[in-house]
């Protein structure tokens, strides 16, 4: 019997291809008209440290769902790193939740594409199933109150000033 993670991964391959071909990064983030609470998560990183949504309460957080087998996910990771390098100084978080893979697989990827922001592992795909993810990569921007404010399906250039300004505005509006 195949695991839930396998079935979700197969679905993501199909949906991600369609989402990424429909629009590739030059589209703005989609504002969610009825912001709902972001589903909680408490996940381990490859080094064993825990990452929790609750740890980011009070500041905006970019939450990316990705996998190493997903070409658009791999392609956008350097721009997420560049965005993180700017946003971290401003008290804004970036987390990329890996879907269904283990620490060794992630370590292989980061050995050639280093990142310094948290990479928690959703090894059983429970977290990704709780979020409104339809394919990989999907990224949400969570507002300081813990609500889903924006979504981006497919690859983006996360260090694009227009995208970063939308994220920064959430922090400014919280003060």
Image (tube, rainbow, N blue to C red):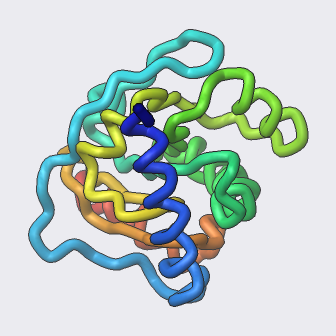
Q: Residue at position x 50%, y 87% from top?
A: 27
Question: Horizontal and vertical percent for residue 21?
Answer: 58, 86
Residue 76, placed above or below residue 50? below
Which residue is at the front of the view, 84 or 38? 38
> Looking at the rendering, in which quadrant would you find the N terminus?
top left
Instruction: In the displayed orientation, state which residue is furthest to the right.
Output: 112
Question: Horizontal and vertical percent for residue 97?
Answer: 50, 40
Query: Does residue 138 appear in the picture of this structure?
Result: no
Residue 89, placed above or below residue 35? above
Which residue is at the front of the view, 7 or 52? 7
Q: Is residue 59 left or right of residue 80?
A: left
- Number of disc labels: 0
Q: In this view, does 4 lie to the left or right of 22?
A: left
Specify the quadrant of the image occupied by residue 3. Answer: top left
Which residue is at the front of the view, 132 or 56? 132
Which residue is at the front of the view, 167 or 29? 29
Q: Residue at position x 22%, y 46% from top?
A: 38
Query: Does residue 131 appear in the picture of this structure?
Result: yes
Q: Residue at position x 41%, y 28% from top?
A: 124
Q: Is residue 41 left or right of residue 26?
A: left
Question: Horizontal and vertical percent for residue 32?
Answer: 22, 72
Specify the quadrant of the image occupied by residue 132. Answer: bottom left
Residue 120, placed above or below residue 4? above
Q: Residue at position x 59%, y 32% from top?
A: 101
């Amino acid at each position: 019997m195949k695991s839930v993670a396998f079935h979700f991964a197969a679905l993501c391959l199909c949906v991600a291809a369609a989402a990424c071909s429909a629009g590739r990064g030059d589209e703005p983030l989609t504002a969610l008209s009825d912001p709902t609470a972001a589903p909680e998560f408490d996940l381990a990183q490859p080094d064993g440290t825990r990452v929790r949504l609750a740890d980011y309460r009070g500041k905006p957080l970019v939450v990316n769902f990705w996998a190493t087998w997903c070409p658009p996910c791999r392609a956008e990771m350097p721009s997420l790193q560049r965005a993180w390098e700017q946003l971290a100084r401003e008290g804004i978080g970036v987390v990329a939740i890996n879907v269904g893979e283990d620490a060794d697989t992630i370590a292989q990827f980061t050995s050639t594409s280093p990142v310094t922001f948290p990479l928690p592992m959703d090894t059983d795909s429970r977290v990704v199933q709780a979020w409104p993810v339809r394919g990989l990569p999907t990224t949400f921007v969570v507002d300081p109150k813990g609500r889903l404010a924006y979504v981006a399906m497919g690859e983006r250039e996360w260090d694009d000033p227009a995208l970063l300004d939308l994220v920064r505005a959430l922090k400014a509006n919280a003060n």
